[in-house]
Image: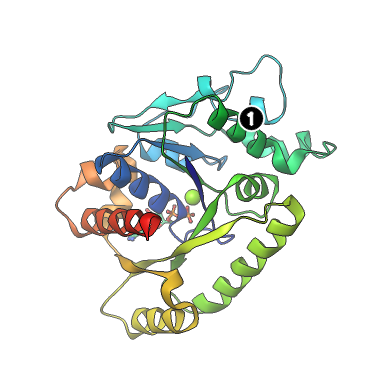
Amino acid sequence: MKIIAVANQKGGVGKTTTSVNLAAALAEAGREVLLLDLDPQANASSALGVEAVPGRSLFGVLTGDPGARSFREQIQPTSCERLRIITAELDLAGCEIQLAADAHRLTRLRQLLENYRITGAEVEFILIDCPPSLGVLMTNALAAADSVLVPLQCEYLALEGLAKILEMIERIKQVSGNNALKLEGIVLTMYDARTNLSQQVVSDVRQHLGSQVFETIIPRSIRLSEAPSHGKSILSYDSAGMGAQSYRQLAQEFLKRQTD
Ligand SMILES: Nc1ncnc2c1ncn2[C@@H]1O[C@H](COP(=O)(O)OP(=O)(O)O)[C@@H](O)[C@H]1O
Ligand SMILES: [Mg+2]
């Protein structure tokens, strides 16, 4: 079982879109996948058509509520075969305050996932859709993860943003004691082939980070932005379109990297 945090402290860069559609593409490719929605906004949950309801998130188990459903009991099926989800809810935002005085607050999720692993996890990959704020939830995700996948929007100052997140990953590795955390790779998103800016960003980022950047680039596509409002991954919403092709390709590249 491998745990991948999809993270970038900036909002609107394609974290949720990438978590949902990469998870769906891995499931389509025959892998058992769990998507963990750790953003109180619950965008990944609704994007897959799973309603965010009170009591159905990791809030209870993360904060040690004795009446809460266990990690395993929080897992729900989605309409995609082999893809399961643990939904988020607004209450998750309360983790910040609830856990403030807890000495183990940064490694709560790590403990839950380790327990899930040793008691027989039925999935091969866990993808964590992180919130943008650099708080206790994102830190828990990075403390629990084997690797971090960073979506990066092809926009002005992308490289500066990237430097910041790489720095932040290093810092979290230290505070959480997760020295084994690896960079899974950087995924360039919302690429617009018609603009010089997009092309410039791709070449700059590749020049600085070389093979750490996925070859697959996610294009800007209206379909990708429409799919969530239909509660479907891009693979079911527009299966033959460019957006679906690009996430399938990303999944293949991701899988190939696991064996290289
Ligand atoms: N490749 C893309 N093409 C077009 N729109 C996109 C693409 N990726 C994401 N979006 C849209 O951009 C917005 C932000 O994306 P999202 O995945 O929610 O980012 P984050 O989770 O980092 O905040 C959403 O409205 C989403 O639908
Ligand atoms: Mg998001």
Q: Is residue 243 above or below residue 228?
A: below
x and y percent of residue 42 in the render? 50, 39
x and y percent of residue 124 in the render? 41, 38
Please identify the quarter of the rendering in which residue 101 is found: top right
For mark 1, what is the residue? 59
Task: Name the image quarter holding the C terminus.
Answer: bottom left
Tell me what residue is drawn at x 43 percent, y 58 percent.
14
Side of 73 where 125 appears, left or right: left
Q: Is residue 189 above or below residue 64?
A: below
Tell me what residue is drawn at x 56 percent, y 59 percent.
182
Ligand 1's quadrant is bottom left
x and y percent of residue 102 in the render? 82, 36
Can the viewer see residue 219?
Answer: no
Tell me what residue is drawn at x 39 percent, y 30 percent.
50
Residue farthest toward the left in the current orientation of the protein: 240
Can the viewer see residue 3?
Answer: yes
